[in-house]
Image: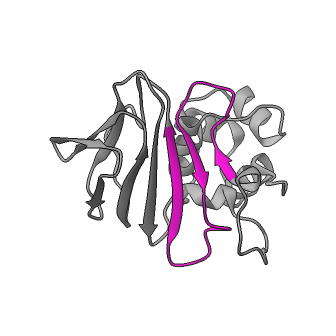
Amino acid sequence: MEELNLGKKIQVIRTQARLSVRKAAAQAGITPSMLSQIENGQVNPSINTLRALAQVLDTPLYTFFQAESTQEVVVHPADRRTIGVKSEPDVLYELLTPDTKGSIEFCMMVIPPQMSSFRDIRSHEGEEVAFMQEGGEVELEMDGQRFLLQSGDSVRIPPHTGHAWHNNSDVTVKVIFAITPPSF
């Protein structure tokens, strides 16, 4: 599997933005020590920390996971780029496309039992289509409405529509989604 050098990419973007470790960490709601450890590859940040850093650095989250160059067209499960740590009970995102350089992004969100994709409702620039692949049912909270999706159901989420996914069941849920343009 290709080395992403996530911490180094964060450090490069932070220094290009002329933000000190202390200032960037404060704005992201983490300690300077934690940011330093992330940049030095000593710890793997949570998805929420990565989102906060992307917001502070005014860069799309997917930028942290872009490879310098890729010739791959097939993505094998063992080679998927992952946001989150597979061994921790947190929402995990797997990039199903080789990279985020195309005009569409294809991902799988794995939501453990009793977890949500976000603490708060979030939106993004791109249009999203999601397919409930596996699990009991998942609740989609979208612009104040709640929708229950079961395996085989799909939904379109318009651009700039606030939404969050909630797995209130006792089984893991897998949702496959496509976003255009890539904004992950």
The vertical placement of 102 against 47, above or below, is below
Horizontal side of 8 relative to 172 (left or right) equals right
Q: Quadrant of residue 125?
A: bottom left
Percent position (x, y) of residue 126?
Answer: 38, 67
Identify the image's colour scheme: rainbow, by chain, secondary structure or one colour.
one colour
The vertical placement of 156 against 123, above or below, is below
- Give the residue displayed 52% in from the left and 41% down from the top: 52
Is residue 157 visible to us here? yes
Region in magenta: 81-110
Horizontal side of 143 relative to 122 (left or right) equals left
Percent position (x, y) of residue 62?
Answer: 59, 59
Residue sitting farthest toward the front:
152
- Give the residue displayed 35% in from the left and 62% down from the top: 129
Residue sitting farthest toward the left:
145
Q: Is residue 108 magenta?
A: yes
- Give the residue displayed 48% in from the left and 31% down from the top: 172
Q: Quadrant of residue 157?
A: bottom left
Percent position (x, y) of residue 169?
Answer: 36, 24
**Where's the N terminus, which quadrant?**
bottom right
| Depth order, front residue of 111/14 | 111
| Depth order, front residue of 98/66 | 98
The vertical placement of 129 against 90, above or below, is below
- Give the residue displayed 66% in from the left and 68% down from the top: 99
Is residue 58 visible to us here? no
| Depth order, front residue of 29/64 | 64
Q: Quadrant of residue 15?
A: bottom right
> Total marks drawn?
0
Q: Is residue 76 magenta?
A: no
Percent position (x, y) of residue 67?
Answer: 75, 65
